[in-house]
Amino acid sequence: MNVVGLWKRGHFELATAETKIDAHSILLLAGSQEQLDRYDELFFIYHLSNAPVVTVGGGRVGRAAARALAERDADYRIVDQRPERILDKEKYVEGNAADIDTLERAGVRDCPAIVITPHDDDQNIYLTIYCRRLRPDVQIISRAVHERNVSTLHRAGADFVLSYAWMGATAIFNHLERADVLMVAEGLHVCETEVPSALAGKTLAEAAIPRETGCSVVALGKAGTLQINPAATEVMRAGERIILICTPDAEQRFMERYNARLSPARRA
């Protein structure tokens, strides 16, 4: 399989042979289901912790996060200071999340992740800083109501930020285009196009698409089949499909450089 790129506290970069992986790196991998299963067997990265995930906020977003965790058989605790939101005393902890005693009752010292969900960016920034100082090693996922606060939340210590603006724009785009955009994460998606005439007959190594555009080639569609992680010596031919992972800026560079039109990748 292929390491396409990695995130470090919200910053994504394409991976090269010289890219160093550290404890804060989150890898973006491309491969078949069989390859992903082999990766899991080798590195054991998806073993669930017995400690509950701490979710701050018992509103709609917090409850939705809890349902998603429950579907994966992952334990959770929801912290909320409103008594009317305490639906289950086993899973809910009443109190202020800015109070260390409340967080400790929820299990913040041992939890594998913290999800911060209130509808208040200022509060979320403060809680992200607070939780990061309490647990430098924990994964923190924060909600951003306003797009302008996404980078601030990353600087505050969030590993991932869920932006209403980006998810809403993607939903509207899907509705208008009648298509599924395969959004890998905020600002990063999968798209496809027919091999442009400027690339036809070239190998992937000769084309150097990642260096020239910032897009990463993850698959080629050949004769009705999808060739995942094609070799650098693979020749691109007219009429075939090329599947890319890219940011909006990289997508624009690809279209301008090769006079191509990208579309959302079809689900295989």
Image (tube, grey):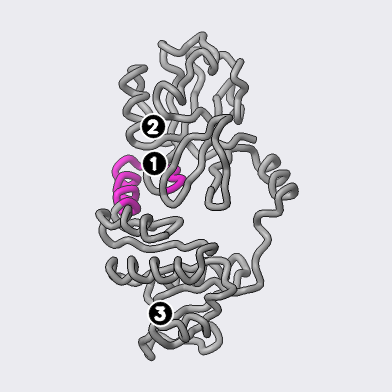
Circle nearer the viewer, 2 or 3: 3
Can residue 180 be found in the magenta stretch? yes
Q: Give residue 263's mark.
A: 2
Q: Residue at x 36, y 63 (%)?
A: 143
Dominant secondary structure of the magenta stretch? helix
Q: Which residue is mark 3?
A: 97
Please state which amino acid type lies under the numbered disc 3. Ala
Can residue 125 be found in the magenta stretch? no
Q: Magenta stretch?
A: 166-185
Q: Residues within 10 Å of mark 3 (few under 14, many from 20)?
A: many
Q: Which residue is mark 1?
A: 179
Please state which amino acid type lies under the numbered disc 2. Ser
Q: Mark 1 or mark 2, which is nearer the start of the sequence?
A: 1
Q: Position of residue 75 (x, y in %)?
A: 59, 74
Label 3 sits on a secondary structure element that is loop
Q: Mark 1 or mark 3, which is nearer the start of the sequence?
A: 3
Label 1 sits on a secondary structure element that is loop
Quarter holding residue 229: top right
Q: Residue at x 41, y 45 (%)?
A: 11
Asked if 185 appears above or below 67 in the picture, the reply is above
* Contact between labelled residues 1 and 2, with CB atoms less than 8 Å apart: yes
Asked if residue 229 lies left or right of residue 42, the reply is: left
Please state which amino acid type lies under the numbered disc 1. Ala
Asked if 142 appears above or below 147 in the picture, the reply is below
Q: Nearer the viewer, residue 55 or 240?
A: 55
